[in-house]
Image (tube, rainbow, N blue to C red):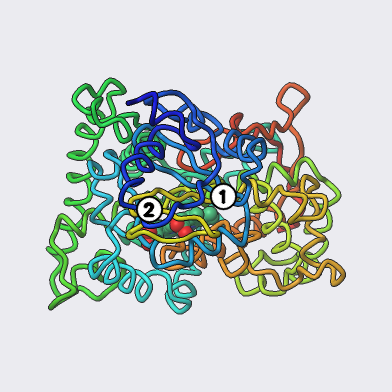
Amino acid sequence: MALCFWLYPGGPAWGKYWLRNRVSAKKPHKIIPGPKGFPVLGSLNLMVNLAHHKLSAVAKSFGAKRLMAFSMGDTKVIITCNPDVAKEILNSSVFADRPVKESAYSLMFNRAIGFAPYGVYWRTLRRIAATHLFCPKQISSTEGQRSEIASQMVSIIACRGGDQFCVRDLLKKASLNNMMCSVFGTKYELGSSNTETEELSQLVEEGYDLLGKLNWSDHLPWLAGFDFQKIRFRCSELVPKVNKFVTKIIQEHKLQSGRKIHDFVDVLLSLNGPDKLSDQDIIAVLWEMIFRGTDTVAVLIEWILARMVLHPEIQSKVQAELDGVVGKSRPLMESDIQSTVYLQAVVKEVLRLHPPGPLLSWARLAITDTTIDGYHVPEGTTAMVNMWAITRDPDVWVEPLKFMPERFVSKDSGDVEFSVLGSDLRLAPFGSGRRTCPGKALGLATVCFWVGSLLHEFQWVQSDDTNSVDLTEKLRLSCEMANPLQVKAHPRRNT
Ligand code: HEM
């Protein structure tokens, strides 16, 4: 039987579906093209290492850029490298759910926004987060905290005195401090070490590693008893640590009765009636916010700085724009960002070439049978969008491999007003539709302001020939630089 299933386009999971439904189907369906992969395993091998590259190459070879089917063990998957089909999938209410991995369950993410099943609970969480964390008023009220962290980063970098350093650790710590401040209300000096930040950053790092791993038993249920990748074991070690860490913060907030609402913990504790969350749900939601908000921002800024070092003429253009808007006598303020058209074009161009989620991080799940691009797609199918392939497709972008922020500023290109927030699927690094990233405005505001500050204050140059900028990628939950950026930063503003 396994061999029969495997013979179908798309491999064993699709073969099983088509053979079992052949009798019941009223009319024969068009079959989605795709690789057979291996018997039983299907194309699980495509999902290791740089999955977005492999999936893009296979889709090309099958002439299936619009829609390709493949199997990950027992899981039926469809993937598109086409913006129109991506829109059809992401904006369809049928794909408003997510397939939940075992690690996501174990790490409580099914009780937080990202993996909560589509329904009342998920909608409530999104509404609460949208009102109290991500709305424009709330974002601007936290400007002071981002500005404080930016100036701490500037002081730390200035102290390096132009020596070579690895910028990643600083960016991750800045991003973590920023999220800890918004979510927990805790403020730490970036330069000083403290056990709470150290501990939380290790928890986030471990969670990242676990969620980013391909867990074979998610797709081959008969392997579930073995835990040979030790994912279940590592999750069971991590969860009590997260629980202990976050519970302590919640208890501290509860002890200060009559306290005004300062942070997201206060917001969640103040909920009443049908919105009231259990302590366990509060822990899950808080942990997710810290988790999601930390790495994405740091990863994107590292790619932007790498591009600035590789393209000094573009870096100079951003700096000329910043000097024109701000001058050299004062630091950048967040309100200046709206006048920095070229800086924003640079951020968009880096999002195009290096989307932090090349496969949009987390897939979608079909709640019912549906039709996509004229093909029948059954309930329970996992759907992915290869955003990386779309943003590098010569049929979609002119000279797609060229780093050219001008494409977002020149009137001729027609992309001057391009929004990266999900309305145009040619570049939608935050996803689109009901499950689009709720943190996109906050994430973009943080990235633009911090990158603007770092470029306004310093000239960024390559460290030396042995540590030249290497754009090789490593795909974990986000796609980061495989070799962390090593740079020198020379002050350019007289303080
Ligand atoms: C550069 C920054 C960021 C990028 C590139 C990014 C990207 C993404 C992507 C691609 C998705 C999946 C969207 C989809 O399925 O259509 C997502 C979901 C999500 N993101 Fe972000 N994100 C960023 C920042 C943030 C921040 C700062 C937060 C929170 C503090 C956040 C919280 C979330 C959550 C909770 C979800 C799940 C939404 C749901 O399932 O309803 N993200 N993000």
Residue that label 2 marks: 378
Indicate whether 210 appears above or below 448.
Answer: above
How many neighbours does mark 1 have within 10 angstroms: few (below 14), some (14-19), or many (20 or more)? Answer: many
How many neighbours does mark 2 have within 10 angstroms: few (below 14), some (14-19), or many (20 or more)? Answer: some
Residue that label 1 marks: 67
Residue at image coords 68%, 48%: 353
Residue at image coords 81%, 53%: 404
Whole-percent x, y for residue 236 in the image: 19, 33
Q: Quadrant of the N terminus?
A: top left
Residue at image coords 52%, 29%: 49
Tag 2, which secondary structure? loop
Q: Is residue 88 left or right of residue 161?
A: left
Query: Considering depth in this image, is 371 or 478 the residue closer to the camera?
Result: 371
Q: Is residue 6 left or right of residue 128?
A: right
Indicate whether 16 appears above or below 434.
Answer: above
How many labels were placed on the picture?
2
